[in-house]
Amino acid sequence: MATPYQIEIPQAKLDWVADRLRNHAWHHEAADSGWSLGPDPAWFRGLISYWAAEYDWAETQARLNRLPHFTAEIDGDGGPLDIHFIHQRSPREDATPLLLVHGWPGSILEFEELIPHLTDPDGNGAPGAPAFHVVVPSLPGYAFSGKPDRPIGPRAMAGYLARLMADELGYDRYTAQGGDWGSVICSWLGFEHDACRAIHLNMYALRATERVGDKARPLPPEGGEELAWQRQAQKWVQVGGGYYHIQATKPETLAYAMNDSPVGVAAWIGEKFRTWIDRTSTEDGDPTSAGSAGSYESLDIVIGRDRLLSNILLYILTDSFNTAAWTYRGHSEEGSGLLPPGKRIEVPTGIAAFPREIVPFPPRRFVEQAYNVTHWTNMPRGGHFAAMEEPDLLLDDIRKFGEAL
C-alpha cells in the first residue's frame, strides 16, 4: 500500500554540508585549464561560493513537496525496497498512465517542469492535447528510494518499476519514457513486462545480437553511416568514459571520497552536466576551448545554478552517491545492454533523437534491429538532459507519440 511521503531533510545534515563547504581544502589547480582537465576552476569556485552563501535548499524542498509524493514497498531482485515516486493524476477522464524514468546523474528534478503540462494540458495552454497520469519514481538506490544491499542494474530496476505500476498502482496499460539509464530501463520494461504497451526514448539503449557458438554478439554495423556511428561511440568511451569504467568496476573506492565531500560530488556530477548538455546556442567559437568565457557560462544558462545544485544535493542529502553509482556495476553484471539473440522489442517505440546526445542515435535501420520504431523525431537542438534542456520539444514529442498510439 502506497504511503504519502514528505521530503524532510534534517537540519543537522544541512549544517554538515554547510560546514564542509566552508572548510573545503582547495588543491593546487592547473593554470588556464578551462574544462580540459575537469571543472573549470574559476567557474567551479564561483559555484561553491554561491552554494555556501546564497543557495536555499528550503525553497527547493518546499517546491517539491507541493507535488504528491509516495513510497511503496516493492519486492524485486534486490530484495524488498521502499520505492519513492511522484504520482500526479490528471483531471481528465481520458488520461493514460505515463511512467517517466530518470538516469544518472539525474533525478526526479528532470521532469518537474513537464508534470503539469502532461497531466493538465487544458489548464496549461494546450487544450485538447493528450493527458497523462504521471508517475515519476526515484530509482532504487537513488534519492528517497530504498538502497539495495548489493549492486543491481537497469534490468532489475525495470522489475521494481513494473511491479510499482501494475501491482501497486493498478495500471494494466502504460507508456514508459526515459533517457540515460531511463532509456535502458524503459527498454527492458517494453521487452519483458506486458503492461508496458509502448516506450519513448531519448537515448539509444539496447542492442540486437546474434548467436556465435554459445555466445551472443552484437549485430555488426553495416555501411558508412553505421560504421561512423560505431567509431564515434568508441571514441567517446576512450575520451569521456572514465567515470563509467570506475563506477562499473570499483564504485566503493570512489564512494569513500565522495560521501565525505559535497564539493567532490559537485565536481563529479557538475562536470558531466556541462559536458553532456547542448552548448552550441550559448557559446562562440570552439565549444571545447579551454578558458573561453562561454565554455563555463553555458551550464549556468542551460541548466541554471539552483537547479544543478538541487540535483547534486539529492545525491548528498540522501547519502545515495554510492548506491546510485552501483547501477554501472549492475549493468555490467547483467550483460551490458544486449538483447537475447534474435530477439527484438516489439512494443511501439518512439525515438526523440537530440543532436548533442553523448553518442547520438545510430541510423534508423540499425535501431530497428532492436526496436519496433513507429515514431522518430530528429530534434533541432538539445543534449543528454532533454527534459531539462528542451522541455517544450520533449513534451511535444511525447504528445505526438501518445496521439499516434
Image (cartoon, rainbow, N blue to C red):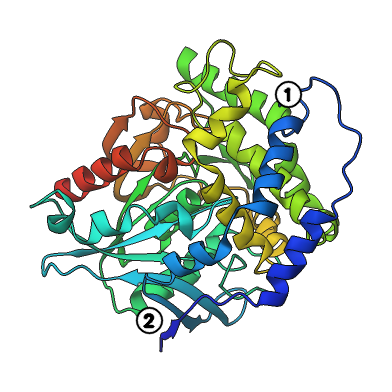
Quadrant in which residue 81 is drawn = bottom right
Residue 149 seen in render = no
Q: Residue at x 32, y 53 (%)?
A: 114
1 w.r.t. 310: above or below: below
Left or right of 88 in this view: 205: right
Instruction: Name the foreground residue: 270 vs 327.
Output: 270
Label 2: element kind: helix
Label 1: element kind: loop
- The residue pinned by badge 2 equals 168
Instruction: Name the foreground residue: 38 vs 28.
Output: 28
Residue, far front: 53
Q: Residue at x 57, y 59 (%)?
A: 56
Quadrant in which residue 149 is drawn = bottom right
Question: Percent position (x, y) of residue 21?
Answer: 77, 55
73 w.r.t. 92: above or below: below
Question: Percent position (x, y) of residue 252?
Answer: 81, 59
Q: Tell me the tag on residue 34.
A: 1
Instruction: Name the foreground residue: 93 vs 404.
Output: 93
Left or right of 33 in this view: 110: left
